[in-house]
Image (spheres, coloured by chain):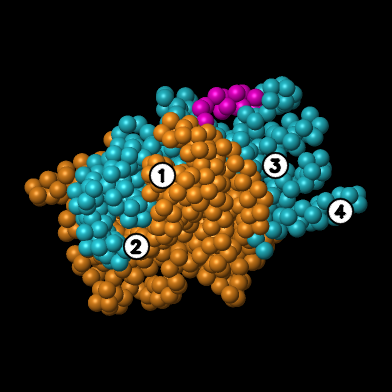
Chain colours: A cyan, B orange
Amino acid sequence: MNNEDLAVTLAAKLSRAIEQQQFEQAINEVQALRPIDIADVLALIEPKFAWQILEVLPNRSTIFAYLDADIQVAMALEFPRASLAKIVGEMPSDERTDLYKHLNQEQRDALLPALAQAKREDIRRLSAYEERTAGALMTSDYATLAAQMTVAEALDALRLEAPDAETIYHAYVIDGARKLLGVVSLRVLILASPEQLINDIMVRSVISCDVNDDQEDVAKAVARYDLIALPITDASGALVGIVTHDDAMDVASDEATDDFHKSGGVSTMVGKLKDVSIRMLYRKRVFWLVFLVFGNLLSGLSISNFEDVIAANLVLVFFLPLLVDSGGNAGSQSATLMVRALATGDVVMRDWFSLLGREALVALMLGATMAVAIALIGYVRGDAVVSLVLALSMMSVVMIGCVIGMSLPFVLNKLGFDPATASAPLITSVCDASGVLIYLFIASKFLAI
Amino acid sequence: MNNEDLAVTLAAKLSRAIEQQQFEQAINEVQALRPIDIADVLALIEPKFAWQILEVLPNRSTIFAYLDADIQVAMALEFPRASLAKIVGEMPSDERTDLYKHLNQEQRDALLPALAQAKREDIRRLSAYEERTAGALMTSDYATLAAQMTVAEALDALRLEAPDAETIYHAYVIDGARKLLGVVSLRVLILASPEQLINDIMVRSVISCDVNDDQEDVAKAVARYDLIALPITDASGALVGIVTHDDAMDVASDEATDDFHKSGGVSTMVGKLKDVSIRMLYRKRVFWLVFLVFGNLLSGLSISNFEDVIAANLVLVFFLPLLVDSGGNAGSQSATLMVRALATGDVVMRDWFSLLGREALVALMLGATMAVAIALIGYVRGDAVVSLVLALSMMSVVMIGCVIGMSLPFVLNKLGFDPATASAPLITSVCDASGVLIYLFIASKFLAI
């Protein structure tokens, strides 16, 4: 049974227990589970009852933080104001800010006065950063040390900070102006002798990101340097937050989803597929579909220029979808390889020229293989001349498709677009238009009109 | 300047310094860098010189572990056997095993006798696990504790294990038979009082994976439960290794790349795009291209059944690529959304039916929009009847495309294939064949032959 089936089964049990007013039993069912698993169960039952169960669980703020924003808001409406303030106050600062952003003005006005001053400030500060930046991703619950502390003092300080900090495995050394001076890992701390100074054992060359950096760069830095957390600094070099490895992993997954969607001609979409509204789905898909309808008119225009040769050789139409699709398919392959390699950083802009040479060679081999296949079929359906036209067209179509497919992501990147915009549908349409032109041009040279 | 440009610049400096026999200067250039950054520089210079620099760096085994396997092997050939054994002995056990797998028999025979008995055993054991399983991914460098230890004893034990363990932030509690009993975080340890028993503070419900589990499931568990490391157990419940968060993040990225490639009709490919051989690229792409040539013959066969109506209405050919591509594009979008949602776990098999209803509605809206667009163009190029044929065809083609696009990943999954096999090229070809048939069938009903 997977996590989701388990959640459905448990949610049904819980709902029954609640109907029979057996709250204790309901709570017993879930309290041994992990916070995220409890969140999955609570998401499936009525917000009112979910809140009643959540209220008595010891790690309720952690569980609440795992819920989707819309469910958090629905549940928040059920909370007495004092409880809401308490649970929101206990949440990790990044999650708390996300929730705040999802509340309407009235809910915000109800929540803010109930929070402690420091938490209000924190929400105001964190919610000011633009979406998809390091600032919007980071948490302000990190552990700091001073350079002149001894190891013993540092360990005592960390013990005090532990309940609130998201991680104490990396502690950041700052000066009076919060400027980031270095980092010490807990591993180093417990190995050092108690009287050593932090200043002498800290690592000074800290990998950090700026608060305005793209969240994708943050995720890449965490992945590249195998970090548990990445410190985020502002323009003055002052430490303002950290991004933890688990949040970086979520970003990497979201960014992959985004690229994946773009590769299929779907615009950036936030939220799970099951939860996204039909209107949103329509909006995210219609642009490319209609845009490509007009793009495909180019194929039609090529065709109308060669109506004579088509009329005289209707067999050409038989092979039309096959030929143009082959170019599009080969092009989609090239674009897919290139878009992903650019996204992971395996390939950079200046590799374009050397990759083009390799791609041309691969395209030649692929084109030749496919030319043989289609020439055989062409000979059976038509004659030797048709066979020759098909083989030549296939070679050209595949070569051109590959060159377009591998170049378009680079061109888009150069023009400041996301290379993932070179989606399979776009590549297919571009390759189709050129494929039709090539095919009919070659045919018009060899076949009688 | 990005990481790679920096590496190129530094590698050039290094090569010059080495040519002038100024080794010390070369070493000074790199030694302040992070291990992975040094590895990137060393990868760009001759193995012989790279080795001479690496040899004197204090964290050489960490740096060496970051190099790609082929460069590791090339450098290994330059090492004196004793140095090779030393550096390989110091490597993390998972990286060491990966290197071992890349050596030929002669190199293995040279290496093994130079390693300590325990490391030899470790390599033999780890290299026996199938690729892409938890066993092939895990490291055996983890920290263990006994349940009857006090916190003070546990901290002492961790201090001893720290130099070898990949992480001491999670320590695993095992019994005499290495059965996994619980987990203790270093955070909990430093907060506990020294005389408390591990048995009383450990978490007993440990999230773990089986050694034969798919590496994708391991990465998903690490992501879901925000773990720093995930313990791996064998069939008897004995702890045999751990997978750390950074390795899990790499797996998630590799799996996303794999799905991405499949979505573009490229088979599973190992290695960076720049490094993959041309022959490999050809092999990974030719199957789908040739397979789809034969698939597209179906489109051709539909066409040959309707040659009369085409011959009488050549304007139909003008709209042929546009119409069939639209179906393919809409289908690619649906498939992309579905494949990624299945991969991330946002959608499970039993969601198919409810998603189909939503998809049909979205398809209806998309189809209607596009029908209006094409009807206008059709009216300009043809007449009212052509316009009607086009609008009806577009509606049908988009609807069918979406249903195929969203269902095929589910069907493939049900049949035991990776849903990502429902690539854009495959969907396009299937949708094209049905699109041609629908279009020409509708045309034959409305237009004169």
Q: Secondary structure at mark 2?
A: helix
Disc 2 or disc 4, which is closer to the eye?
2
Q: Are marks 1 and 3 on the same chain?
A: no
Circle 2 sits on which residue? B290
- Quote the CA–CA distance across marks 3 and 2: 52 Å
Q: Residue at x 67, y 43 (%)?
A: A67
Up/down of B254 relative to B109, above or below: above
- Residue numbers of the magenta segment: A118-134
Circle 4 sits on which residue? A17
Quarter of image, res A71: top right
Residue A64 circle label:
3
Q: Secondary structure at mark 1?
A: loop
Tell me the amino acid under the disc marked 4.
Answer: Ala
Q: Residue at x 33, y 53 (%)?
A: A314
Inspect this view and state whether residue A446 appears.
yes
Circles 1 and 2: CB atoms closer than 8 Å: no
Q: On the picture, is B207 further left or further right than B252?
A: right
Disc 1 or disc 2, which is closer to the eye?
1
Residue B313 circle label:
1
Count of number-bearing discs: 4
- Quote the CA–CA distance across marks 4 and 3: 21 Å
Up/down of A87 relative to A390, above or below: above
Q: Residues within 10 Å of mark 4 (few under 14, many from 20)?
A: some
Quadrant containing the N terminus of chain A is bottom right
- Quote the CA–CA distance across marks 4 and 1: 69 Å
